[in-house]
Amino acid sequence: YQQLHERHGIRCSMTDGYDCYQNALAERVNGILKCELLLQRPHDLLEARKMVMESVTIYNQERPHLALKYKTPDAMHRAF
């Protein structure tokens, strides 16, 4: 697995320790990507990149979060 990444110039990013909340943002964005946007395989790398950006946009601008009193991260950021 790691050799495959290395062969293609991909640097893996892993969390330190075993804190399950440390990677929550990435897991949430990946969940949106996998369950909502990747219902069909992207035609090319450009389309895949657009899907990733769309999942980040959905997370930041469209999905309210319980921990933020049902506001989006973007709305909370603008409030400050």
Image (cartoon, helix red, strand yellow):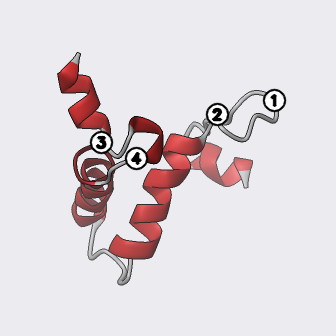
Q: Report which quarter residue 75 is drawn in.
A: top left
Q: Is residue 6 left or right of residue 3?
A: left
Eyeballing the image, is 26 above or below 63?
above
Name of the residue lying farthest toward the bottom? 40
Q: Residue, x 49% and y 62% (percent of image)? A: 31
Name of the residue lying farthest toward the front? 69
Name of the residue lying farthest toward the top? 80
The Cα–Cα distance between marks 3 and 4, rounded to whole angstroms, is: 6 Å
* Location of mark 1 (residue): 17
Q: Residue, x 46% and y 69% (percent of image)? A: 34
Q: Quadrant of the C terminus?
A: top left
Q: Are marks 1 and 2 in contact (CB under 8 Å)?
A: yes
Q: Are marks 3 and 4 in contact (CB under 8 Å)?
A: yes
**N-term mark: 2 or 3:** 2
Please state the horizontal and vertical placement of residue 71, each as a whole percent of the image: 30, 42
Please rate how many residues cluster around mark 2, counting C-alpha atoms within 10 Å: few if below 14, some from 14 to 19, many from 20. Answer: few
Q: Quadrant of the N terminus?
A: bottom right
Eyeballing the image, is 80 above or below 12?
above
Eyeballing the image, is 17 above or below 69?
above
Circle number at residue 71: 3
Can I make out residue 59 in this image? yes
Please rate how many residues cluster around mark 3, counting C-alpha atoms within 10 Å: few if below 14, some from 14 to 19, many from 20. Answer: some
Amino acid on which disc 3 is placed: Lys
The Cα–Cα distance between marks 1 and 2, rounded to whole angstroms, is: 9 Å
Q: Residue, x 23% and y 65% (percent of image)? A: 47
